[in-house]
C-alpha cells in the first residue's frame, strides 16, 4: 500500500473505531455504570433527563448522555490561579491521548492468519510488537494523572498524584509479566496472531488461568477502579488527583479512564477470551490464509464486543462490591504477591511447555 | 443478661486469597442486580413527583388552621403556639373581632416555614384545636424567602371543621 | 405580745396582727384573692382559709387576728381540701376564656388553681352566663363572667380614688360588678382596678389584645410624667414598650399610679430621631455621632466667649446626666447663661398627681446648685447677644416668642429624641435616649432618689445627654472625666454633691432613698435564692 | 514502503489525530464555557479552609523508592518479551530448548533475588 | 518529632505535608477538622478541631422550658434521636422525682432500642462507605430507612422525632405498630445478612479494620470512653446493665464485648448489638400492657385535649404548663442513659423555675473523639477514615 | 451513686471536704480547691473505689444565686464497683482557676477545655488550654450568665447593633 492509502485508511479506521465504538462505549459506560450500580444497590439510577422532555424508549438514556456531554462542554473552563497553567491543561490531555492511541493495535475482527500476507481490515496498525506498543503507550497515562496532580498545587491532588504514580507503575510490571505466558504459548506479541492461536488450541483463560486472574487484578489496578481506587479515594482524598479539575478537563480525565477500562477489556478479550473467536466455529480462510469475510465476520465482531461487555461488566461489578485497599496493602499486594506470582506463573508455564513440547 | 465476646473470624487460607469472598460478594450484588433488572422487586427508590409516599397519620407536615362553624378562622390568637414554639417561627397579631361569641381573632397569622422545625409543639399547645400539622403535606421549596412565610389565608385553605368545641367559651 | 406557731414555726407579733401578716413575716405563703394590703379587708373569697387550734372551722387568715398560743396549719389535708373546694367553687362559673383573656399569665386564679388544686373538673352542667366585654369607663372593660367577686375594685374606688363608682348588684351566682347608674368608671386612677383585679374581669382597653403578658420583659423604672415619680414597671415586647404598671413603693406611691402617667408611654413611641443630623450648606444631613459632637464643640468655641453661649438644661435629665452636664457648665462652659427648661405646670390633686410635670427637677436643681451653676427659670430666658445655644430635651415649654428667638441664634445645638420643632431649629442635632433607654436615678419632689433602668435597647445611635456632656468635656480638654456606666457616675456624684452623700446604687434598695436621710445598709442586687438541694 | 515500517504510518496519523482531538475538545470547552473567576473559587481545595502548607515541597522519600523499584523491574521485564515470543520456536529445536529454558530460569532467578533483596532491605515497607 | 528528620546538615530530608482534613471533607460527616501532618502516607501528627456545628444547645436550654428542650435533643445525636429524647426526659423526671407510667417506659425502651439500631446501622454502613464499599453502605441505609418508616409512624417524623415528654410520651403507639415493626425487622435482618456477606469475612475489609485504630482497655477507660467503643476493648460496661434504668433489668439481653479494641471489634460489637436490640424490643413488646402513657399529674403533663377545650380547669393547667413550663424543684441531678455511642448524660441544675438554670450534656462522642489522636498517630492516612468512622463521631452531639 | 465514696473521701481527707449532700440519689462532695488533685488521684487509685472512668467535667455559673459564683463539677464513675460520685469545687470570679486533673485522667482534656471555653475557668496545669468549641478569636465566655444576649464577635459579620454609650 502506498503511504497515501495508509494515511487514508488510518484516518477512516481511526474514526470508525474511536468514534464509532470507543467513544460511544466510554460515554455509554459512564451512564451504564451508574445504572448498574443503582440496580445493585436497589436504586433506579439516572432516569430523569429526557430528550426535549419527550418520553420514548431509551429516552432517559439518551437524555442523560446528551446532557452529560453538553454540560461538560458549556461549563466554566476553570483553571486554578495558583496552578501551573500549561501542566494543568496538559494533564488531562496526556491522560486521554494514550487511551485513544492504544486502540491502533487492537483487532476487532478476523485478520489474516499468522504468517499470511494481507491487510487486516479491523485493525489500524498491524504492528509486530503490538502488545509491546500498547504497554509503552499505556505507561504514558500515568504522566497525565501525576502532572495534573502536581500542577494543581493542592495537597489533596498531590497525594492523589503520588498514589497514582506509585500504584500504576507497581501494577504495570505485573500486567506486563502476566501476558508473557500468553506470548510464550502463542509465540507472538501480535494480538491477531494470539487470537488465531487461541482458535487453534484453546482460549488463554484455560491455558493461563492464574495469568488471567492476575491480569484481571492488575488491570483493575491500572484503571484505578475499586478496590484499587486509591488515587481518587473519595473518602480520603476528596477526589484525588483531579480534585482541582472541572468541566471538560475533568471530563477528559474520566473519559481517559473509561476508555482505559474498555481498552483493558479489549486486551483481556484478545489474550484470554479468544478475541473474536466463536467457540466451535471455524473461521473460513482462503488459500493464502486471509479470512473470507461474510456474515460470520459480523457475528465475530459482535461476539468480540460482547466479550468485552462481559469483561467490563465484571470489572464494574467488582468495583461496586468491594471496599478498597490501603496504600501499603496495595503496594504489598503488587510487589510481594502479584509480582512473585506472575514470575512463578512464567516459570511454571515455561517448564510445562518444555515438558510437553 | 450476660456478656458475650464477639468472635473475630479466623480467615481460612482460601479467604486469605481474597477470591472466595470476592465471589461471594459478587454473588450478592449480582443477585440484586439481576433481581432488580428483571423484577424491580427490591427497588426502594420512589419516583417522587409522580409517585408519592403515603405519609402516616401522625406525620407532622405543613400547618393548617381549622375553621369554626362559619368557616372563619378558629384561632383566637391566644399565642400559646408562638410561646411553645422553640424556634419562634409563629407571628400573630391579635385583634378585636367585635363579635359576641369570640372577642379575639388573629389579624395576621404568619408561620415562617424556613424557621419552623416541625416539632409539633404548636398543635400540642393549641387550646382551641385551631392549628394542626396533619395536612399530610411536606413543606415545599420555593424561590424566595417570602414565599416561605405562609399567612392566614394559605393556612386556612387546608383547613377543616373541627369536632372539638371552641375554646374560649365555656358551656 | 401574742406568740403563735405557724406550721410548727414560732413567732411573736404585735397584737392585732392577722394570721396572714404573721405568716408573711415568716415567709409562709397563704393564697389570697380578695386581700390587698392597700385596701380594707373583705375576707369574701375564702381562699386564705387556714386551720387553727382556736376554732373548729378553718379561719380566713387575712381577717383572723392572732391569739396567744395559736397553732396555725397552712398545709395539710384539711386546708388543702378547703382550698380545692374554694377553687372548684370559684371556677364553677368561670368561662373557658384563658385564650382570649388578657390576664392569662399574670392571673392569680391561674396561679392558685395550678398550685393548690390542679384537679380535673367535675362539672357537667351549663355555666352561668353574664355580660361580656362590657365597657365600664374610658379605659376599662368588664367581663362579668370572669369576675370572682373579690370586690377589690369596689374597695379601691371607695378608699383610694374616693370616687365610689363601682358596686356589686344581684345576689348569689347572679352577682356582678357594675357602675352605679349614670356613672362611669372614669376617675383618674381607674386603671388601677385592672391591676388589682386578680382575674381578667377588668381589663384595660388600651392594652387589650396587644401582647400576651408572659411574653413581656419587664424592668423597674420611674414614671416621668410628674414630679411624684411613681415607681413603675416598664413592660416591653420586641423592644417596644407596651405598658406601664405601678409598683409598690411606700415612700412614693404605695401601689398606685394615675391613668395619665400610665398611658403616657404612647407619646414616646413614634417620631424618634435615631441618628444625629447637622446642617451643612443650608441642607440637613445625617452624620455620625463623632462628627456631630465635633460640630457641637466647634459651635460652642466659635461663640467667642461663654457670655455669648446659652444652655437650656432640662429637668428630664437623670441625676447622673445632670452631674455630667453640671461639670460641663461649671468647667469649659463656665459663664454661659443656663436656663432650666421643662414642661409647663399642670393640674395636681391630693392623691398622687403633682402640678409639676417633670420627673427630676429637684435632682437637677440640687446638683447644679451644688456645683455652683446659676440657673434661671425658663420664663426668664434671654437670648439677646447669644451666638450659640445648647438645648437639651424635647419637653421644654418654650413660648412661640422664645422659639423664634431661639431660631435667630447663630448656632443651635439640640439634644433631643424626637423629630419636633426643636429638631427643625437645630443646626446640630444629637439624638438622646428616652428615660426607658437609660440607666440612672431620678429624684422626686420629696427627694426620694429612685433607680430607673433600661427597659429596651436604645434606638439607633442615641446616647444620653450625659454622654454628650462627657464627650464635650473631653473635647474641651478635660479628659479625666471618663466613666464606665452610670454606677460610676453616681459614685462620683455622691462624692461631690452634699445632698447625695453616702448614696450608692447598692443602698438605694427597692424603694429608693430619701435625700438627707441616713442611707440604709446596702442590699444585694438580687436576693440569693437557694439552689442547694434539700429533698 | 518498507513493510516493517508501513504499519507505523497509521500510528503516526492516529497520533496526530488524537492530539488534535484532545486539543479540540479542551479548546471547545474554553470557547463555550463562561469564565467567572473569583477569589474563593481560586483557592485550592483543602476541606473548606485556606491551605495550610505549600504542597510543592519535598515529599516523602518512599515514593521515590517505588519509582526506582519500578524502573528496575520494568526494564527487566522488557528483556523477557523478546525471549517469550521466540520461546515456542526454540522449543522446537531440541538442542536449544534446555538452553532457552535454563537461561530464562536464571534470569527470573536473578529477578527474584533482586526482589528478595529489596524486600529484605525494607524498601517494601510502606507502613 | 518533626525535628528528628530535619537535621541542619541533612539536605536530603523529606518535608512534612500539612493537610487540613475537614471541616468540609467527604470523610468528616459531622463537621470537624483534622489538621494532619503527613510524612508521605504516614500520619505524624493530628490536631482535632471541633466546634463547627456548635449551636449553643446548653445556652438555648437555659431559656427554654424543659419540654422545649426535647426538639433540641433530637439534634444531638441525629442518627439516634430517640435515645436522646429518652435520656433527656429521664433526667428531668429524675429531677422532678417522678416516674413515667409503665407503658410509657416500655415504649421508650422500644423506641430507644430502635434508635440504637439505626445508629449502629449508620455506623456500620458509613464504615463500609469510608472504605469505598458503597453497596453495603446503601444496604445499611436502606435498613435504617425501613426502621425510620416505623419511627415515623409512631412519632410523626423520621429524624426530628421529639417523641417523649416530661412525664410520659407524646402519644401511645399507633394501631398496627406490631405489624409494621415486624416487617421492618425482617427487612433489616435480610439486609444485614447481605452486609455481613459483603464485609465481615472479606479480607480487604478485614485487613483494613483489624488491628487498625486499636486502643487498650486502660487507655479507653482513661479517656472516658463508654458504649460500644469501650466494650470493643473488652471492658464490660453498659449503663443498661450496670445501672438499669426503665425496665432494662426485666429484659434478657447480652452485652457484646470485644478483645482488641480495634476497628474490627467495634464493627463486630455494633453488629451484635443490633441483634441484641431486636431481642430487647421483642421482649418489650411482649411484656408491655395497655395503660396510660402519661403521668396523672397536671403539674407535669398537659391535660387531655377534651379537658382543655371544655373545662376551665384543664385550660388553666394547659396554659400554665405552656407559659411557664414544668416547674422542677431546685436541685441538681445527673441523669444518664446508654445512647447509641455510649453514656449520654444530662446534668441539670434547676433553680425551681420552669426553665433549667444549667444543662450540661455529656456527649459520649466527646470522650471518644479526643482519643483519636493517639489512635491514628503513626498509622497511615487511610487508617484515619475507618477509625474516625467506627468511633462514630456525631457532630451534633460533640458540638451541641 | 454511692454514699461509700463520700464516706471514704471524708475519712481520708477530712480537711478537704467543704460539704456533702445527696439529692435524688446523686452523692455530691464539695471539695476545697487545693485538695482536688489529691482526692481525684485517691479516688482513681484506691482499689476499693477504683473510679477509673472520668464521666464529665463542667462549669456552672451561679450568678446571683450563690457565692462564690462558679462551680466546677466532676462526675466520676467506677466500672468495676458500679458506683458514682459528683465532686464540686467552688471558684470565685476573681480567682477563676482550679488545678487540672489531666494528670489523673487523660479523658478530662477536652472537658476542661470546654469549661474554659464556656466559663473562662482556668485549669492550672492543663497542657493545651485552648478553646475547643468556639474559635480562638471569640471574645468572652458565652455560658456565663452575664454574657450579653446580643453582642458583637470578631469574624462574625453582624448588622449594626446599638452599643453602650
Image (cartoon, coloured by chain):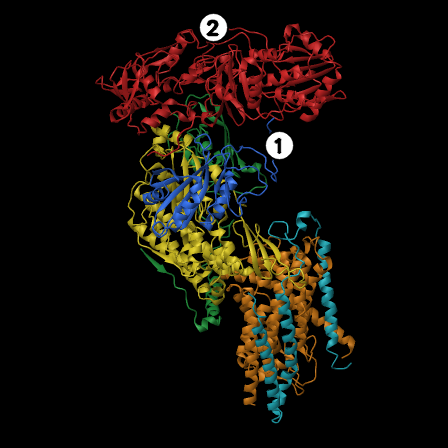
Q: What's the residue at 69%, 74% (across, down)?
A: A124
Q: Residues within 10 Å of mark 2 (few under 14, many from 20)?
A: few
Image disc number at residue C350: 2
Chain appearing in yellow on the rendered image: E
Residue A19 position (above or below residue C481): below
Chain appearing in blue on the rendered image: F
Chain D: what color?
A: cyan
Task: Using the rendered image of the protein, determine whether residue E169 is visible from the camera's viewpoint.
Answer: no
In-front residue for pair E141/C250: C250
Marks 1 and 2 sit apart, C-alpha to C-alpha, by 48 Å
Task: Using the rendered image of the protein, determine whether residue A135 is visible from the camera's viewpoint.
Answer: yes
Image coords of residue B107 (percent x, y)? 50, 27
Chain B: what color?
A: green
Query: Label 2 marks which chain's residue?
Result: C
Chain A: what color?
A: orange
Residue at the disc numbered 1: F160
In-front residue for pair E183/C2: C2
Amino acid at each position: 500500500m502506498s503511504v497515501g492509502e495508509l494515511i487514508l485508511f488510518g484516518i477512516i479506521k481511526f474514526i470508525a473505531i474511536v468514534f464509532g465504538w470507543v467513544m460511544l462505549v466510554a460515554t455509554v459506560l459512564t451512564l451504564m455504570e451508574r445504572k448498574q450500580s443503582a440496580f445493585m444497590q436497589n436504586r433506579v439510577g439516572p432516569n430523569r433527563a429526557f430528550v426535549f422532555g419527550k418520553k420514548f424508549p431509551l429516552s432517559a438514556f439518551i437524555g442523560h448522555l446528551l446532557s452529560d456531554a453538553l454540560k461538560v462542554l458549556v461549563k466554566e473552563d476553570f483553571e486554578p490561579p495558583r496552578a501551573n497553567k500549561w501542566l494543568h491543561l496538559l494533564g488531562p490531555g496526556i491522560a486521554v491521548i494514550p487511551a485513544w492511541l492504544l486502540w491502533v493495535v487492537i483487532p476487532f475482527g478476523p485478520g489474516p492468519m499468522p504468517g499470511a500476507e494481507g491487510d487486516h481490515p479491523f485493525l489500524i496498525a498491524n504492528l509486530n510488537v503490538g502488545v509491546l506498543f500498547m504497554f509503552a503507550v499505556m505507561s504514558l497515562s500515568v504522566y497525565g494523572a501525576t502532572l495534573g496532580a502536581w500542577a494543581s498545587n493542592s495537597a489533596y491532588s498531590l497525594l492523589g498524584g503520588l498514589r497514582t504514580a506509585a500504584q500504576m507503575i507497581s501494577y504495570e510490571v505485573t500486567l506486563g509479566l502476566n501476558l508473557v505466558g500468553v506470548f510464550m504459548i502463542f509465540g507472538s506479541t501480535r494480538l491477531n496472531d494470539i487470537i488465531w492461536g487461541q482458535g487453534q488450541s484453546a482460549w488463554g483463560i484455560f491455558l493461563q488461568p492464574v495469568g488471567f486472574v492476575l491480569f484481571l487484578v492488575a488491570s483493575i489496578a491500572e484503571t484505578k477502579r475499586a478496590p484499587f481506587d486509591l488515587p481518587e479515594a473519595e473518602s480520603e482524598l476528596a477526589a484525588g488527583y483531579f480534585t482541582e479539575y472541572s468541566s471538560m478537563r475533568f471530563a477528559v480525565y474520566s473519559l481517559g479512564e473509561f476508555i482505559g477500562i474498555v481498552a483493558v477489556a479489549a486486551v483481556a478479550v484478545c489474550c484470554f477470551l479468544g478475541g473474536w473467536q466463536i467457540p466451535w466455529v471455524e473461521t473460513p480462510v482462503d488459500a493464502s490464509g486471509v479470512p473470507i469475510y461474510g456474515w460470520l465476520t459480523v457475528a465475530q465482531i459482535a461476539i468480540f464486543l460482547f466479550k468485552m461487555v462481559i469483561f467490563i461488566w465484571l470489572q464494574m461489578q467488582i468495583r461496586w462490591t468491594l471496599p478498597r485497599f490501603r496504600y501499603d496493602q496495595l503496594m504489598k499486594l503488587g510487589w510481594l504477591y502479584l509480582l512473585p506470582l506472575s514470575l512463578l506463573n512464567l516459570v511454571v508455564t515455561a517448564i510445562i511447555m518444555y515438558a510437553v513440547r | 443478661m450476660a456478656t458475650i465476646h464477639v468472635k473475630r473470624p479466623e480467615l481460612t487460607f482460601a479467604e486469605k486469597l481474597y477470591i472466595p469472598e470476592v465471589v461471594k460478594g459478587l454473588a450478592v450484588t449480582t443477585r440484586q442486580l439481576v433481581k432488580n433488572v428483571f423484577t424491580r422487586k427490591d427497588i426502594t427508590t420512589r419516583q417522587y413527583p409522580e409517585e408519592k409516599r403515603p405519609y402516616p397519620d401522625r406525620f407532622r407536615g405543613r400547618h393548617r388552621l381549622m375553621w369554626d362553624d362559619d368557616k372563619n378562622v378558629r384561632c383566637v390568637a391566644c399565642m400559646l403556639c408562638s410561646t411553645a414554639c422553640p424556634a419562634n417561627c409563629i407571628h400573630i397579631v391579635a385583634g378585636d373581632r367585635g363579635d359576641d361569641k369570640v372577642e379575639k381573632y388573629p389579624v395576621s397569622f404568619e408561620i415562617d416555614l424556613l424557621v419552623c422545625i416541625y416539632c409539633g409543639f404548636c398543635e400540642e399547645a393549641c387550646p382551641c384545636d385551631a392549628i394542626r400539622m396533619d395536612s399530610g403535606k411536606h413543606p415545599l421549596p420555593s424561590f424566595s424567602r417570602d414565599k416561605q412565610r405562609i399567612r392566614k389565608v394559605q393556612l386556612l385553605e387546608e383547613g377543616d371543621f373541627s369536632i372539638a368545641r371552641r375554646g374560649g367559651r365555656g358551656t | 405580745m401574742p406568740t403563735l406557731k405557724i406550721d410548727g414555726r414560732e413567732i411573736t407579733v404585735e397584737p392585732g396582727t392577722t394570721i396572714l401578716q404573721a405568716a408573711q413575716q415568716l415567709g409562709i405563703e397563704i393564697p389570697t384573692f380578695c386581700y390587698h394590703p392597700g385596701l380594707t379587708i373583705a375576707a369574701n373569697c375564702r381562699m386564705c382559709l387556714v386551720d387553727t387550734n382556736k376554732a373548729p372551722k378553718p379561719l380566713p387568715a387575712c381577717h383572723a387576728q392572732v391569739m396567744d398560743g395559736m397553732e396555725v396549719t397552712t398545709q395539710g389535708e384539711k386546708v388543702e381540701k378547703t382550698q380545692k373546694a374554694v377553687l372548684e367553687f370559684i371556677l364553677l362559673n368561670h368561662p373557658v376564656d384563658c385564650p382570649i383573656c388578657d390576664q392569662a399569665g399574670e392571673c392569680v386564679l391561674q396561679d392558685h388553681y395550678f398550685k393548690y388544686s390542679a384537679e380535673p373538673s367535675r362539672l357537667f352542667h351549663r355555666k352561668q352566663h353574664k355580660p361580656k366585654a362590657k365597657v365600664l369607663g374610658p379605659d376599662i372593660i368588664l367581663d362579668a363572667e370572669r369576675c370572682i367577686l373579690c370586690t377589690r375594685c369596689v374597695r379601691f374606688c371607695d378608699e383610694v380614688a374616693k370616687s365610689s363608682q363601682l358596686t356589686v348588684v344581684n345576689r348569689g351566682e347572679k352577682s356582678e360588678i357594675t357602675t352605679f347608674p349614670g356613672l362611669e368608671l372614669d376617675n383618674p386612677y381607674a386603671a388601677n382596678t385592672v391591676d388589682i383585679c386578680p382575674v381578667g374581669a377588668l381589663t384595660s382597653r388600651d392594652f387589650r389584645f396587644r401582647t400576651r403578658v408572659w411574653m413581656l420583659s419587664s424592668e423597674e423604672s420611674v414614671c416621668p410624667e410628674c414630679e411624684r415619680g411613681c415607681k413603675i414597671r416598664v413592660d416591653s415586647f420586641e423592644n417596644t414598650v407596651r405598658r406601664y404598671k405601678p409598683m409598690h413603693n411606700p415612700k412614693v406611691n404605695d401601689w398606685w399610679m394615675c391613668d395619665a402617667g400610665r398611658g403616657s408611654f404612647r407619646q414616646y413611641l413614634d417620631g424618634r430621631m435615631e441618628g444625629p443630623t447637622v446642617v451643612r450648606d443650608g441642607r440637613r444631613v445625617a452624620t455620625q455621632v463623632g462628627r456631630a459632637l465635633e460640630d457641637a464643640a466647634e459651635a460652642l468655641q466659635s461663640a467667642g466667649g461663654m457670655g455669648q453661649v446659652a444652655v437650656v438644661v432640662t429637668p428630664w435629665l437623670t441625676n447622673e446626666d445632670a452631674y455630667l452636664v453640671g461639670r460641663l457648665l461649671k468647667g469649659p462652659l463656665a459663664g454661659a447663661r443656663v436656663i432650666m427648661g421643662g414642661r409647663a405646670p399642670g393640674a395636681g390633686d391630693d392623691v398622687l398627681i403633682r402640678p409639676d410635670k417633670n420627673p427630676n427637677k429637684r435632682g437637677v436643681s440640687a446638683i447644679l446648685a451644688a456645683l455652683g451653676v446659676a440657673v434661671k427659670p425658663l420664663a426668664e430666658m434671654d437670648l439677646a447677644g447669644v451666638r450659640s445655644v445648647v438645648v437639651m430635651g424635647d419637653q421644654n415649654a418654650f413660648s412661640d416668642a422664645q422659639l423664634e428667638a431661639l431660631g435667630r441664634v447663630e448656632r443651635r445645638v439640640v439634644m433631643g429624641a424626637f423629630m419636633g420643632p426643636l429638631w427643625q431649629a437645630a443646626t446640630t442635632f444629637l439624638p438622646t435616649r428616652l428615660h426607658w433607654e437609660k440607666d440612672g436615678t431620678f429624684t422626686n419632689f420629696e427627694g426620694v432618689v429612685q433607680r430607673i433602668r433600661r427597659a429596651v435597647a436604645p434606638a439607633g445611635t442615641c446616647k444620653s445627654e450625659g454622654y454628650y456632656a462627657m464627650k464635650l468635656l473631653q473635647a474641651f480638654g478635660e479628659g479625666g472625666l471618663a466613666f464606665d456606666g452610670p454606677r460610676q457616675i453616681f459614685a462620683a456624684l455622691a462624692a461631690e454633691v452634699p445632698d447625695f452623700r453616702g448614696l450608692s446604687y447598692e443602698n438605694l434598695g427597692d424603694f429608693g432613698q430619701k435625700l438627707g436621710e441616713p442611707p440604709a445598709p446596702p442590699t444585694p442586687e438580687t436576693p440569693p435564692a437557694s439552689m442547694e438541694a434539700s429533698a | 514502503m518498507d513493510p516493517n515500517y508501513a504499519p507505523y504510518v497509521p500510528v503516526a496519523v492516529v497520533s496526530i489525530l488524537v492530539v488534535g482531538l484532545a486539543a479540540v475538545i479542551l479548546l471547545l470547552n474554553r470557547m463555550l464555557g463562561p469564565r467567572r473567576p473569583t477569589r474563593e473559587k481560586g483557592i485550592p481545595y483543602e476541606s473548606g479552609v485556606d491551605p495550610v502548607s505549600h504542597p510543592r515541597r519535598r515529599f516523602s522519600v518512599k515514593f521515590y523508592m517505588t519509582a526506582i523499584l519500578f524502573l528496575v523491574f520494568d526494564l527487566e521485564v522488557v528483556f523477557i518479551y523478546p525471549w517469550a515470543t521466540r520461546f515456542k520456536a526454540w522449543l522446537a529445536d531440541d538442542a536449544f530448548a534446555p538452553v532457552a529454558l535454563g537461561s530464562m530460569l536464571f534470569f527470573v532467578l536473578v529477578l527474584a533475588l533482586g526482589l528478595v533483596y529489596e524486600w529484605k532491605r525494607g524498601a517494601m515497607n510502606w507502613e | 518529632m518533626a525535628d528528628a528528620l530535619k537535621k541542619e546538615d541533612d539536605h536530603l530530608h523529606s518535608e512534612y505535608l500539612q493537610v487540613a482534613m475537614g471541616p468540609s471533607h467527604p470523610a468528616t460527616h459531622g463537621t470537624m477538622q483534622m489538621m494532619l501532618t503527613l510524612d508521605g502516607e504516614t500520619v505524624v501528627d493530628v490536631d482535632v478541631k471541633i466546634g463547627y456545628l456548635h449551636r449553643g444547645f446548653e445556652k438555648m436550654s437555659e431559656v427554654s422550658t424543659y419540654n422545649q428542650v426535647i426538639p433540641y435533643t433530637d439534634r444531638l445525636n441525629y442518627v439516634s434521636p430517640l435515645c436522646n429524647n429518652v435520656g433527656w426526659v429521664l433526667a428531668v423526671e429524675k429531677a422532678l422525682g417522678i416516674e413515667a407510667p409503665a407503658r410509657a417506659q416500655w415504649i421508650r425502651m422500644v423506641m430507644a432500642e430502635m434508635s440504637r439500631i439505626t445508629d449502629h446501622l449508620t455506623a456500620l454502613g458509613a464504615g463500609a462507605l469510608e472504605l469505598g464499599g458503597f453497596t453495603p453502605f446503601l444496604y445499611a441505609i436502606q435498613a435504617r430507612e425501613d426502621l425510620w418508616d416505623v419511627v415515623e409512624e409512631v412519632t410523626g417524623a423520621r429524624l426530628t422525632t421529639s417523641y417523649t415528654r416530661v412525664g410520659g410520651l407524646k402519644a401511645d403507639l399507633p394501631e398496627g405498630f406490631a405489624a409494621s415493626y415486624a416487617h421492618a425487622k425482617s427487612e433489616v435482618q435480610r439486609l444485614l445478612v447481605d452486609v455481613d456477606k459483603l464485609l465481615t469475612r472479606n479480607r480487604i475489609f478485614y485487613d483494613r479494620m483489624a488491628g487498625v485504630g486499636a486502643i487498650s482497655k486502660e487507655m479507653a477507660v482513661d479517656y472516658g470512653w463508654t458504649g460500644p467503643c469501650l466494650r470493643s476493648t473488652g471492658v464490660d460496661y453498659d449503663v443498661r446493665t450496670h445501672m438499669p434504668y426503665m425496665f432494662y433489668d426485666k429484659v434478657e439481653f447480652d452485652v457484646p464485648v470485644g478483645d482488641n479494641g480495634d476497628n474490627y471489634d467495634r464493627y463486630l460489637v455494633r453488629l451484635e448489638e443490633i441483634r441484641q436490640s431486636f431481642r430487647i424490643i421483642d421482649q418489650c413488646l411482649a411484656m408491655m400492657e395497655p395503660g396510660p402513657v402519661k403521668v396523672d399529674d397536671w403539674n407535669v403533663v398537659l391535660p387531655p385535649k377534651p379537658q382543655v377545650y371544655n373545662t376551665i380547669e384543664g385550660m388553666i393547667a394547659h396554659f400554665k404548663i405552656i407559659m411557664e413550663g414544668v416547674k422542677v424543684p431546685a436541685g441538681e441531678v445527673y441523669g444518664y442513659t446508654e445512647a447509641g455511642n455510649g453514656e449520654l448524660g444530662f446534668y441539670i441544675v434547676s433553680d425551681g423555675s420552669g426553665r433549667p438554670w444549667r444543662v450540661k450534656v455529656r456527649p459520649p462522642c466527646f470522650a471518644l473523639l479526643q482519643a483519636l489522636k493517639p489512635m491514628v498517630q503513626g498509622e497511615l492516612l487511610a487508617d484515619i477514615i475507618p477509625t474516625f468512622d467506627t468511633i462514630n463521631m456525631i457532630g451534633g452531639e460533640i458540638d451541641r | 451513686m454511692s454514699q461509700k465514696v463520700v464516706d471514704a473521701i471524708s475519712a481520708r481527707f477530712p480537711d478537704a471536704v467543704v460539704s456533702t449532700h445527696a439529692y435524688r440519689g446523686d452523692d455530691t462532695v464539695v471539695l476545697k480547691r487545693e485538695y482536688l488533685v489529691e482526692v481525684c488521684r485517691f479516688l482513681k487509685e484506691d482499689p476499693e473505689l477504683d473510679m477509673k472512668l472520668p464521666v464529665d467535667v463542667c462549669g456552672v455559673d451561679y450568678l446571683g444565686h450563690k457565692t462564690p459564683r462558679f462551680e466546677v463539677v466532676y462526675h466520676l464513675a467506677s466500672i468495676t464497683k458500679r458506683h458514682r460520685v459528683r465532686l464540686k469545687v467552688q471558684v470565685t470570679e476573681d480567682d477563676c482557676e482550679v488545678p487540672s486533673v489531666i494528670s489523673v485522667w487523660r479523658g478530662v482534656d477536652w472537658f476542661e477545655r470546654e469549661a474554659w471555653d464556656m466559663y473562662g475557668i482556668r485549669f492550672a496545669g492543663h497542657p493545651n488550654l485552648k478553646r475547643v468549641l468556639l474559635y480562638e478569636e471569640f471574645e468572652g465566655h458565652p455560658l456565663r450568665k452575664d454574657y450579653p444576649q446580643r453582642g458583637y464577635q470578631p469574624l462574625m459579620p453582624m448588622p449594626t447593633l446599638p452599643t453602650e454609650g
